[in-house]
Amino acid sequence: MARDSDVQGDCRHVEAFLEMLAAERGAALKTRQAYASDLADFATHCAPLSLSEARGEEVQSYLAELSRAGLAARTAARRLSCLRQFYRFLMLESVREDDPTERQQAPRITSSLPRPLDEDEIRLLLETGTRGHENERRDIVSRAALELLYTTGLRISELLALPATCVHVRGPMLLVRGKGGRERLVPLSQSAREAADQLVHFDRDLGSPWLFPGRDPQKHLTRQGFDKILLACALKAGLDPDRVSPHVLRHSFASHLLAHGADLRALQMLLGHADIATTQIYTQVMSERLRQAVAAHHPLARKAGAPVDAD
């Protein structure tokens, strides 16, 4: 049974770790809550050892237990990442001298990126899917939302949180507040700015602080409300609604930029990825697509009847 002093010590260390995440990294409340839950789960596994006493054996057996329980590889990798950050924090605080996660390999995560829309489908969505809705305002909202999502690569949470004043700043850039409160500048196309301007002008009497007001103008449009708009746009464009989502539009933005020669570092900044490794998954998808294109269309590849090595 864990000693009371060990339990109290763990609580102090976890609290200090979470405070550091908030103060130094701008971690959101939900992120801190998830980390606290992960650490509590590992503490239960380690008992009677305390978190500060855990060894590499405990980390290894914990990951094995998660695998046996059928936990998704992405979730297990996130929990290992949490433990790594926690123990490195303890080392910086001189609570312990080693990192028990140092030799542990993260579970292998397969690409889960959705299939992007091609450029013709995007054009159809923007030109046909944003017209002929039940009223003029729905046409204007649809146009502004799709123009912004596809031309900036914003996350849906970032789009819906845009203030109405974002279009008041004249210039080619849009200031976006992303995950963890991190801010970044993304280029704003002329057509997207005009669509957003038109929406702000149409809604001027609502007095809403948001670019996309909800039923209550003092609150922004909900994700569920936006999904209904996107569904209607997909149907009007004749596209499969299951293939059209905010994440697919963000993925299409990234894929089309890479296909036209965009730099990976620039794409990282545009997408707001804290780690370049997150952006590199797009290059893996592009490489596979190129390999398939060669295998399907190169005359020698077709003659051989076998895939061509992408290298």
Image (cartoon, rainbow, N blue to C red):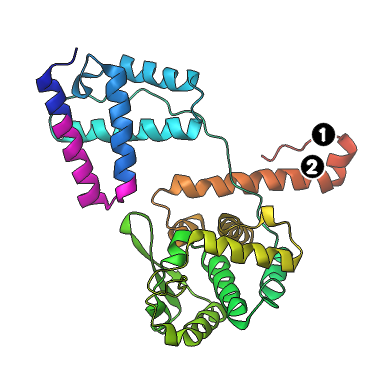
Of all residues shown, which one is farthest toward the front? 216
Of all residues shown, which one is farthest toward the right? 303
- Specify the quadrant of the image occupied by residue 233: bottom right
Residue 44, placed above or below residue 186:
above
User: Which quadrant is home to the C terminus?
Assistant: top right
Callout 1, which amino acid?
A: Ala
- Specify the quadrant of the image occupied by residue 37: top left
> On the picture, is 31 further left or further right than 89?
right
> On the picture, is 5 further left or further right than 238?
left
What range of the chain is rendered magenta?
11-30
Q: Main secondary structure of the magenta part?
A: helix
Counting every numbered tag in the picture gives 2
Give yes or no for residue 221 being in the magenta stretch.
Answer: no
Name the secondary structure under disc 1: loop
180, 256: nearer the viewer: 180
Instruction: Estimate the x, y position of residue 122 in percent, counting from the top left.
Output: 68, 66
Which residue is at a point 45% across and 60% down the rendered structure image? 157
> On the picture, is 183 further left or further right than 11?
right
User: Which quadrant is home to the N terminus?
Assistant: top left
Q: What residue does disc 1 label? A: 306
Residue 185, placed above or below residue 134:
above
Instruction: Estimate the x, y position of residue 305 in percent, counting from the top left.
Output: 86, 35
Q: What residue does disc 2 label? A: 295
Which residue is at a point 83% across and 40% down the rendered structure image? 301
Residue 27, placed above or below residue 136:
above
Q: Earlier in the sequence, mark 1 or mark 2?
A: 2
> Is label 1 in contact with label 2 (beta carbons under 8 Å)?
yes
Callout 2, which amino acid?
A: Ala
